[in-house]
Image (spheres, rainbow, N blue to C red):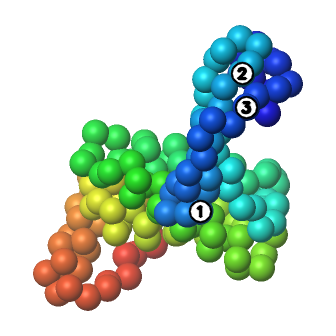
């Protein structure tokens, strides 16, 4: 592993442990050339995924972009980072194990909405406002009313797609 500080080709692993509920391995490394310490993560990748954008363009799937989407939606919310990591890992596992190599952005968005609903209602509404392209306060009101009805009835109510 190349050192991020001095670009030396050699680094030594000082500590390894499971991370993200066993879905990754966290390794603490040290560079013998400059003494710099850094952390790397290893994850299993079942297949290379390609995201099919609404414009028809195809781009490689980026786990970090998915992670950032969660972090933006949950900014300043009381959601533990480990829960976010588990949600992201769960979505990636579902996508990789689906058997498809191309995944539409809409499918990823729905998985994110589902995960955010389980994590935090405010994060869910924030993400939904961008994903569903809210145009006014009535869109927020409708989504919040649907959430309240779902909580009150303790049943799953499909959120409208308009």
Secondary structure, mark 1, is: loop
Q: Residues within 10 Å of mark 2 (few under 14, many from 20)?
A: many
Q: Is residue 116 above or below residue 69?
A: below
**Residue for point 39% across, 58% down:** 83
- Of residue 153 and residue 66, the one placed in the foreground of this image is 66
**Residue 157 locus on image (x, y percent):** 32, 84
Label 2 near label 3: C-beta < 8 Å? yes
**Residue for point 25% across, 74% down:** 146
Q: Is residue 70 above or below residue 120?
A: above
| Mark pair 3, 2: CA separation | 6 Å
Sequence-wise, which precedes: disc 1 or disc 3?
3
From the image, which quarter does the N terminus lie in? Answer: top right
Secondary structure, mark 2, is: loop
Q: Is residue 3 above or below residue 63?
A: above
Q: Is residue 49 left or right of residue 73?
A: right
On residue 12, the disc is 3
Sequence-wise, which precedes: disc 3 or disc 2?
3
Q: Which residue is mark 2?
A: 31
Residue 64: tell me if it is visible.
no
Label 3 near label 1: C-beta < 8 Å? no
Residue 77: tell me if it is visible.
yes
| Mark pair 2, 1: CA separation | 26 Å
Q: Is residue 160 left or right of residue 36?
A: left
**Residue 14 locus on image (x, y percent):** 63, 35
On residue 23, the disc is 1
In front: mark 2 or mark 1?
Answer: 2
Secondary structure, mark 3, is: strand
């Amino acid at each position: 592993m190349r050192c991020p500080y001095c670009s030396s080709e050699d680094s030594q692993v000082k500590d390894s442990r499971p991370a993200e509920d066993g879905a990754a391995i966290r390794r603490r490394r040290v560079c013998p050339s400059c003494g710099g310490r850094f952390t790397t993560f290893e994850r299993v990748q079942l297949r290379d995924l390609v995201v099919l954008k609404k414009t028809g363009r195809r781009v490689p799937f980026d786990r970090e972009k998915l992670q950032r989407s969660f972090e933006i939606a949950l900014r300043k919310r009381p959601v533990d980072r480990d829960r976010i990591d588990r949600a992201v890992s769960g979505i990636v596992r579902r996508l990789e194990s689906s058997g498809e190599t191309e995944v539409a952005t809409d499918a990823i968005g729905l998985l994110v909405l589902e995960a955010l609903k389980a994590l935090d209602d405010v994060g869910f509404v924030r993400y939904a406002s961008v994903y569903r392209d809210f145009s006014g306060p009535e869109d927020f009101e409708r989504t919040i009313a649907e959430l309240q009805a779902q909580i009150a009835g303790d049943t799953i109510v499909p959120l409208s797609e308009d």
